[in-house]
DNA sequence: GCCGTTTTCGGCCCGACTGTTTTCAGTCG
C-alpha cells in the first residue's frame, strides 16, 4: 500500500460518511488525513516502521490504527463496512458537477443509481426531474456534467491552462469596464495540473465586465453568471471562473482565492486564535477592518512574513512565516545555465551553435549539450566515435563564443542490468554525464532500485535525468525506492534532475523538497529538443519553488568553472 | 476524528450562486 492508496481509502470513507450525513467535522478529519498523507515526501510504510505515524499532521489514534491495518492487511474494516451500505459506484456519481452527497444518496435510494452509466440513463429518461429538490434544469446540468467528465478527464497541464488563461486575460484587458486582472487559484500556485482557472478583476461596471467575459472567443457555455462571480467552459473543456473584487479589498480577495483551501483554513485558524478574522474582504479586529488593499497588508496584519503563492499548500509554511524562517525561493534569474538538451546529432532540431545563441539571449553563461547514446535508437542515439566527432564540432563553436561555454555532455542510457550504454573511457572525456532510463519501465521496484544504484556507482555519472519517468496524464512513474536512491545519490555526488519539460516536471514538488531535506543537489534542465524549448525553464523553476528549493540547492546557479570542478569529482 | 502558547473539552471557514422553493437546501471553491 502506497501513500496514494491509503489516502484514497480515507477519501472514500469521507465520501460515504458525507452521503450518510454523519458529523461534518468527523468527515473533515478523514479528508485532512488523506490530504496530509498525499503531501508526504516519505513512504508511509517506512514512517510506520519507525513508529512515527502519530507525528504526521492530522493523524490521531483512530486513523493511525487504520493505517496500520491497511499496511498489514491491505484492507480497512471500517471502509469495507461502509462500502456495504454505499456501493463504490455511488461515489463515482459524486464526481459529476452538481451531484453532491445529498443528491447521490437521493438517486441511489429512490432510483437505484449506483454507477455513472445508470445516472446517465436515469437522466436521459427524465427520471431525475421528478425527484424532490431536483428539476428539469438540474437534470440537464447533470447530463452535461457527465459529458464534461469524459471530455476533459478533469485536469489540464499547467502550461496548457496558462496558455488559455493568458489569452483570456489579454481579452479582458482590452475592455474599458475592466481594470486590474490577476490570476488566482492553483494556476497562481503553479500546480503541475490545474482543474480550473480563477481570474480576479476590478471593475467600475460589473454588469458590463461580466458581459465581456461570457462572450470571449472560445467560450462554449456559460455555467453561472452573477454580479460578482461567473463561470464559463471553453471549447477545450477548461472551466474559467471570473470574480469581480472591490479595489479596496483586492489584496484580501487575491489572498483568499489563491488558496490553497488547506492553507486558508490554517491561516484563518491562526488569525482567529490571535483575536483576528480574515475573509475575502479583509482582515478584521472585531468589526474594524485593519487590512485589505494588498496581500502584503493582510500578511502583516496577521503577523506573518509574505508567503509566496507556490508555498501556500499548508505544508508548514505558515509556521515558518510566523517565525520569519521561510526559505528564500529560487528565481529564474538565479540560473546561469541549462544542463540538458539535444541537437541534430541525436533527436534535436538545432545545432549546438543555434542552441548557444538562444542561451546567450536568455542571459546564460553556459549550456551542456547532452545527446542520446546508441541504445536509444529511436531518438537517433550515437556511439562513442560519433559523439567524439560531435565534441570536436562543439570545440570549434566554443572558440567563437566569448564569455559563454558549451559543455560537452551526453545522456547515456541505463541498460536493464544497470550498466551504462557507453564505455568509461568516453564518459571520462565528457564535461557532463547525464544518465537516464528509457526502457524496461515495468520492472519491480527492488530490481529497478538496484539498477539505478549500480548506475550511480559509476564515478562518471553527474546527473540522473527525469528520475521517475512519468509523463503528466500519460504515463505513471516507474517504481523504485526514492529514499534509497536519494541516499546513494548524495553519497556519490550525483545530482537529481528536475526536468522543466512541461509534460514531465520530474522530480515533482514533493520529491524536490525531500531531496532538499536529504541534502541531495538538484539540476534543473529543460531536455530541449529545439532552441525555442529552452524557454521551458520557467516551468521547472515553478516546480522548484513549489518544492521549497533555494538558490543553494540547485547546481545550475553556479558558474561554469565550479560546475566543472564538481563534475570532475 | 483531530487538536491544544487561553483549552484534554469544545471547538472545527464561510460567502456566492443555482434551482427549487415560498424562505432555503445543496453545491462549490
Image (cartoon, rainbow, N blue to C red):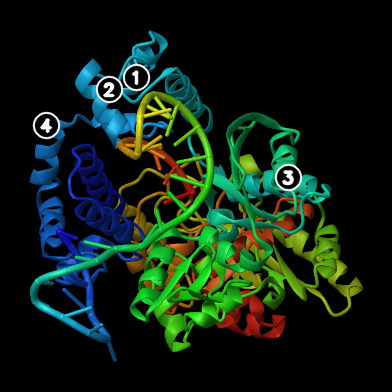
Residue at mark 3: A209
Which residue sits furthest right? A400
Q: Is residue A343 left or right of residue A14?
A: right
Residue at mark 4: A84
In front of the other: label 2 or label 3? 3
Measuring 42% from the left and 20% from the top, which residue is drawn there? A139
In front of the other: label 4 or label 2? 2
Residue A544 in view: no
The local crowd at label 4, few if under 14, some if 14 to 19, many if 20 or more residues have their Cα within 10 Å, is few
Measuring 61% from the left and 62% from the top, which residue is drawn there? A540
**C-alpha gap between disc 4 and disc 2:** 17 Å
Q: Is residue A118 left or right of residue A400?
A: left
Q: Secondary structure at mark 1?
A: helix
Residue at mark 1: A119
Q: Nearer the viewer, residue A281 or A308?
A: A281
Question: Which image quarter is the C terminus of chain A in?
Answer: bottom right
Residue at mark 2: A107
Q: Pointer 2 indicates a residue of which chain?
A: A
Q: Secondary structure at mark 4?
A: helix
Q: Pointer 3 indicates a residue of which chain?
A: A
Does the residue at mark 3 contact the one at mark 4 (Cβ under 8 Å)? no
Q: Earlier in the sequence, mark 2 or mark 3?
A: 2
In front of the other: label 1 or label 2? 2
Same subunit: marks 4 and 2: yes
In front of the other: label 3 or label 1? 3
Same subunit: marks 1 and 2: yes
**C-alpha gap between disc 3 and disc 1:** 37 Å
The local crowd at label 3, few if under 14, some if 14 to 19, many if 20 or more residues have their Cα within 10 Å, is many
Quadrant of res A453: bottom left
- Measured as percent of width and height from the top left, residue A550 is found at 55, 78
Amino acid at each position: 500500500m502506497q501513500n496514494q492508496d491509503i489516502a484514497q481509502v480515507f477519501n472514500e470513507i469521507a465520501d460515504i460518511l458525507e452521503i450518510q450525513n454523519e458529523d461534518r467535522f468527523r468527515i473533515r478529519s478523514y479528508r485532512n488525513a488523506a490530504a496530509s498523507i498525499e503531501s508526504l515526501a516519505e513512504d508511509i510504510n517506512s514512517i510506520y516502521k519507525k513508529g512515527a505515524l502519530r507525528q504526521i499532521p492530522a493523524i490521531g489514534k483512530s486513523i493511525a490504527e487504520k493505517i496500520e491495518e491497511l499496511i498489514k492487511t491491505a484492507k480497512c474494516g471500517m471502509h469495507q463496512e461502509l462500502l456495504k451500505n454505499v456501493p463504490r459506484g455511488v461515489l463515482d456519481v459524486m464526481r459529476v458537477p452538481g451531484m453532491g452527497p445529498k443528491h447521490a444518496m437521493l438517486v441511489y435510494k429512490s432510483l437505484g443509481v449506483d454507477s455513472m452509466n445508470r445516472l446517465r440513463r436515469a437522466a436521459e429518461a427524465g427520471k431525475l426531474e421528478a425527484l424532490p429538490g431536483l428539476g428539469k434544469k438540474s437534470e440537464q446540468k447533470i447530463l452535461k456534467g457527465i459529458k464534461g467528465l469524459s471530455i476533459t478527464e478533469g485536469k489540464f497541464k499547467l502550461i496548457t491552462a496558462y496558455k488559455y488563461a493568458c489569452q483570456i486575460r489579454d481579452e479582458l484587458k482590452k475592455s474599458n469596464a475592466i481594470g486590474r486582472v490577476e490570476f488566482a487559484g492553483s494556476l497562481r500556485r503553479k500546480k503541475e495540473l490545474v482543474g480550473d482557472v480563477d481570474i480576479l478583476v476590478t471593475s467600475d461596471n460589473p454588469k458590463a465586465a461580466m458581459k465581456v467575459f461570457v462572450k470571449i472567443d472560445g467560450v462554449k457555455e456559460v455555467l453561472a453568471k452573477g454580479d460578482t462571480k461567473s463561470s464559463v467552459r471553453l471549447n477545450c473543456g477548461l472551466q474559467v471562473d471570473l470574480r469581480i473584487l472591490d479595489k479596496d479589498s483586492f489584496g484580501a480577495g487575491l489572498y483568499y482565492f489563491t488558496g490553497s483551501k488547506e492553507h486558508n483554513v490554517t491561516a484563518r485558524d491562526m488569525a482567529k486564535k490571535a483575536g483576528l478574522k480574515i475573509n475575502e474582504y479583509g482582515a478584521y479586529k472585531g468589526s474594524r477592518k485593519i487590512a485589505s488593499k494588498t496581500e502584503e497588508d493582510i500578511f502583516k496584519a496577521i503577523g506573518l512574513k509574505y508567503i509566496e503563492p507556490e508555498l501556500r499548500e499548508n505544508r508548514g509554511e505558515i509556521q515558518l512565516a510566523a517565525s520569519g524562517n521561510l526559505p528564500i525561493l529560487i528565481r529564474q534569474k538565479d540560473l546561469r545555465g541549462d544542463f540538458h538538451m539535444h541537437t541534430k546529432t541525436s533527436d534535436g532540431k538545432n545545432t549546438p551553435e543555434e542552441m548557444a545563441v538562444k542561451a546567450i539571449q536568455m542571459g546564460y553563461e553556459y549550456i551542456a549539450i547532452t545527446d542520446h547514446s546508441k541504445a536509444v535508437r529511436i531518438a537517433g542515439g550515437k556511439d562513442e566515435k560519433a559523439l567524439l566527432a560531435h565534441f570536436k564540432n562543439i570545440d570549434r563553436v566554443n572558440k567563437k563564443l566569448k564569455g559563454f561555454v558549451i559543455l560537452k555532455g551526453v545522456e547515456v542510457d541505463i541498460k536493464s542490468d544497470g550498466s551504462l550504454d557507453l564505455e568509461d573511457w568516453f564518459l571520462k572525456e565528457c564535461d557532463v554525464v547525464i544518465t537516464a532510463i528509457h526502457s524496461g519501465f515495468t520492472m519491480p521496484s527492488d530490481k529497478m532500485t538496484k539498477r539505478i544504484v549500480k548506475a550511480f556507482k559509476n564515478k562518471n555519472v553527474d546527473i540522473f535525468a527525469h528520475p521517475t519517468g512519468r509523463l503528466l496524464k500519460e504515463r505513471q512513474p516507474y517504481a523504485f525506492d526514492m529514499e534509497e536512491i536519494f541516499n546513494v545519490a548524495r553519497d556519490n555526488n550525483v545530482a537529481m534532475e528536475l526536468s522543466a519539460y512541461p509534460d514531465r516536471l520530474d522530480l515533482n514538488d514533493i520529491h524536490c523538497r525531500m531531496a532538499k531535506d536529504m541534502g541531495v543537489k538538484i539540476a534543473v534542465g529543460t531536455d530541449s529538443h529545439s532552441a525555442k524549448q529552452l524557454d521551458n525553464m520557467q516551468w521547472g523553476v515553478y516546480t522548484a519553488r513549489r518544492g521549497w528549493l533555494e538558490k543553494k540547492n540547485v547546481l545550475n546557479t553556479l558558474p561554469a568553472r565550479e560546475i566543472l570542478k564538481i563534475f570532475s569529482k
